Amino acid sequence: MTDTVLVACPQCHTLNRVPHARLVAGPVCGRCREALFTAHPVALSAANFDAHAVRSELPLLVDFWAAWCGPCRTMAPQFEAAAKSLEPQVRLAKVDSDAEPALSARYAIRSIPTLVLIRGGGEVARQSGVMSSADIVRWVQSHR
Ligand code: ZN
């Protein structure tokens, strides 16, 4: 483990190298000066997904969802709350499975909501169905 970590900016998706000790100190993006952690999930598309899923050195927890999906809407505030607990050790992101069929296909999403925990582009674990924020946090911690 090195003493720095590559983090993709949630605003401009530039990679920033951040010392581990500074992760919790409100680091900002060297390019756009926005906060690297906002305690909110970041909405990702095919254009910026790999910056967070592959090139960032933080684990990425993706919520595959869709606007028409009732259970997805039920879980949305739980996922929001989980972001507050899990950042800055994990990046939380949302992917609209209707708008991003290629990303859904890449991770073989068959039902929503589905959470996929990704590290270095590879799937570490997945869980389908509505979860509480506490369950999301516990589940992620169990796979770290
Ligand atoms: Zn930025």
Image (tube, rainbow, N blue to C red):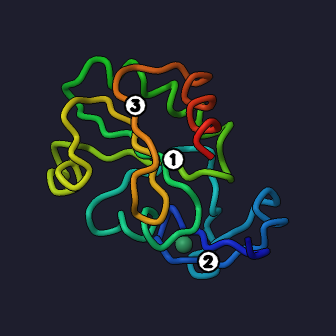
Label 2: which residue?
Answer: 16
Residue 51, image x and y in percent? 43, 71
Going from N to C along the chain, the mark reached first, 3 or 1, is: 1
Estimate the x, y position of residue 48 in percent, counting from the top left: 35, 67
Q: Which mark is residue 92?
A: 1
Disc 2, SS:
strand
Residue 92 in the figure: left or right of residue 129: right
Q: Is residue 27 above or below residue 38?
A: below
Q: Is residue 38 above or below residue 33?
A: above
Q: Residues within 10 Å of mark 3 (few under 14, many from 20)?
A: some
Q: Residue at x 18, y 34 (%)?
A: 110
The part of the image, by quadrant, that contains residue 69 is top left
Foreground disc of the pair 3, 1: 3
Which residue has dot 3 on it? 127
Q: Mark 1 or mark 2, which is nearer the start of the sequence? A: 2
Kindly report the distance in space between the C-alpha atoms of the residues bearing marks 2 and 1.
17 Å
Q: Is mark 2 within 8 Å of ligand 1?
A: yes
- Looking at numbered disc 1 in the image, what kind of residue is underneath it? Leu
| Circle 3 or circle 2, nearest the eye | 3
Res. 29 mark = none
Location of the N terminus (image quadrant): bottom right
Classify 26 as above or below 84.
below
Say which residue appears at 73% left-offset and 66% top-offset: 27
Looking at the image, which residue is at 36% across and 56% down?
44
Mark 3 sits near ligand 1, with its Cβ under 8 Å away:
no
Spot occupied by residue 20 in the image (x, y as percentages of width and height)? 78, 67
Q: Amino acid at mark 2?
A: Asn
